[in-house]
Structure formats: C-alpha cells, structure tokens
C-alpha cells in the first residue's frame, strides 16, 4: 500500500494580496498548478490584508485544481479570516488553527 | 516669507487626501485611513473592515469608473467623531449603476469576482451613494 503524497504547500509571500498584487501573485501560482494538485496547504501567515481581487485569485486556484481539489488554510490573521467568513468562502477553503489540523484534514 | 507657488489653489482640507485613480494610489488611501484610525483609537477589526470597504470602493472607481476616460482622481475625506467613522469617496468618473450598491447578494461560491458590494455592505453600517452634476459621492459609515 502506498502512502498518499503530501499536499502541496504554498506560502503567500505578499503582505497585501490586493488588486495591485493579484497579477504577479497569479503568475507565481501558474507553474505550481500545472500538474493539477488535488490538495494544497495554503499558508497565509505573511498576509495582513486581502481584498476581493486577491480572494478571486485564490478561488481561481481552487477551480484549476479540478472538482476534487481541497485547500486548507493556515496562518489567517483575524481580518483575513473575517473576509473568508463574510464572503462564505470558508465553506470552500478550510480555515485551520494549526498546520497539524490542516494536514489531518488533507490526509 | 514668500508665498508658495501653489497658494492660488484651494488648500486640501485637513483629513482629506486626493490621489490619482490608480491601484497604487488605492494603497495610499488605505494607509491614510490606517493612520487616521490609529490616531483615533479605532480597534483593529473595525479598522480592517473599514479598510476593506474603502479598498473595494476605490478599486471599483479605478477599474470601472474611469475606463475609457482620461486618468482622473479620487478624493477621500475622513471624519471620526465619538468612535464613528465616516469615509467620503468622491470621483468624477462614470457613475456606478444604480443596482450596484442595492445588490448585496454574494455570487455563487466559485465565482472569481462580484463580491465587492456585498463586502462593502458587510463591513460598514451605512452606505450612501449619489451621483450629481458629474460628481460621484460614496459615504461609508461605521461604528460609534
């Protein structure tokens, strides 16, 4: 029996994932999504602010993973978490309190 | 003391910032808001929500209001009284369609855009918009 591969970990390095940062961020994501990973551990620790354009890039990432794609988010600051909840995208992105929790969800 | 070359212009009122309508300047508006709220002791979550509402509204002006026109400007006025924050955004671009601020519904989950108005409403207590004589004015109010 083969153990499942680890999820792909992506750390968003932009402190502001806003409309200005969206295009360069999308460009850094593109090569990571070529192989259509089915699970991503998304680390938002460096991110202090996201707007709806930045959020749209994350939704686009999820769509490119295909119907079985799952994303667990770690390191979401309170405001960033609030945005996911306000837009109800916390139903598509699992917001986790720790990396262990995220890895368990993605196992 | 010699007068400034700009003395013939009306001074910008305190608390008001005028910037070019571009995405880099939206960041300047956000920084201006953070400084004003920090001085007034507005709490972190309220500030985040105000910043989010402001950025969504300003992005909208940059990306839709001035499309097809010469570059314009955005004016932000901030008034804070007893913890209640009023943000007034003024521009002279194309007005927002009447339905925009009335529709607060979120798009379906996998949509990559269309959440701006819902976010603005969700992050503030009052949203007032008018377009008159070529000037658009959006007032966002929160707290207090």
Image: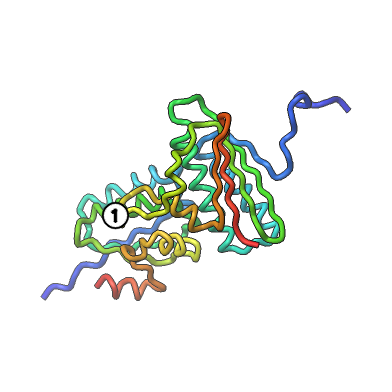
Q: Nearer the viewer, residue B36 or A69?
A: B36
Q: Nearer the viewer, residue A21 or B131?
A: B131
x and y percent of residue A29 in the render? Answer: 32, 50
Residue at image location 35% in from the left, 50% down from the top: A57
Q: Is residue A2 above or below residue A44?
A: below
Quarter where residue B82 is shown: bottom right
Q: Chain of mark 1?
A: B
x and y percent of residue A91 in the render? Answer: 33, 65
x and y percent of residue A41 in the render? Answer: 32, 64
Residue at image location 50% in from the left, 45% down from the top: B57
x and y percent of residue A75 in the render? Answer: 43, 66
Residue at image location 33% in from the left, 63% down from the top: A93
Quarter where residue A24 is shown: top left
Residue at image location 69% in from the left, 54% down from the top: B80
Q: Is residue A83 above or below residue A107?
A: above
> In the picture provided, is B21 more to the left or to the right than B2?
left
Q: Nearer the viewer, residue B106 or A24?
A: B106
Badge 1 marks a residue whose secondary structure is loop
Quadrant of image for the N terminus of chain A: bottom left
> In the picture provided, is B98 more to the left or to the right than A37?
right
| Residue at image mark 1 | B110
Question: Which residue of the protein is positioned furthest toward the left in this rendering?
Answer: A1
């Amino acid at each position: 029996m083969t153990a499942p591969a680890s999820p792909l970990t992506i750390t968003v390095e932009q402190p502001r994932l806003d409309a200005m940062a969206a295009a360069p961020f999308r460009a850094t994501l593109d090569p990571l999504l070529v192989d259509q990973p089915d699970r991503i551990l998304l680390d938002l620790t460096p991110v202090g602010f996201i707007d709806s354009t930045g959020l749209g890039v994350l939704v686009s990432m999820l769509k490119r993973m295909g119907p079985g794609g799952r994303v667990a988010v770690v390191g979401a600051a309170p405001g960033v978490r609030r945005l996911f909840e306000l837009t109800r995208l916390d139903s598509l992105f699992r917001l986790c309190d720790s990396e262990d929790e995220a890895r368990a969800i993605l196992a | 003391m010699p007068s400034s070359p700009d003395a013939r212009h009306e001074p910008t009122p305190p608390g008001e910032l005028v910037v070019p309508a571009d995405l880099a300047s939206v960041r300047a508006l956000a920084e201006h808001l953070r400084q004003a709220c920090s001085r007034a002791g507005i709490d972190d979550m309220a500030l985040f929500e105000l910043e989010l509402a402001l950025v969504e509204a300003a992005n909208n002006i940059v990306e839709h209001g001035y499309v097809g026109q010469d570059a314009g400007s955005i004016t932000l006025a901030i008034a804070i009284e007893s913890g209640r924050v009023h943000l007034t955004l003024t521009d002279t671009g194309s007005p927002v369609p009447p339905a925009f601020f009335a529709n607060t519904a979120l798009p379906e989950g996998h949509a990559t855009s269309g959440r701006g108005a819902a976010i603005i409403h969700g992050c503030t207590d009052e949203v007032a918009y008018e377009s008159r004589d070529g000037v658009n004015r959006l007032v966002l109010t929160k707290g207090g």
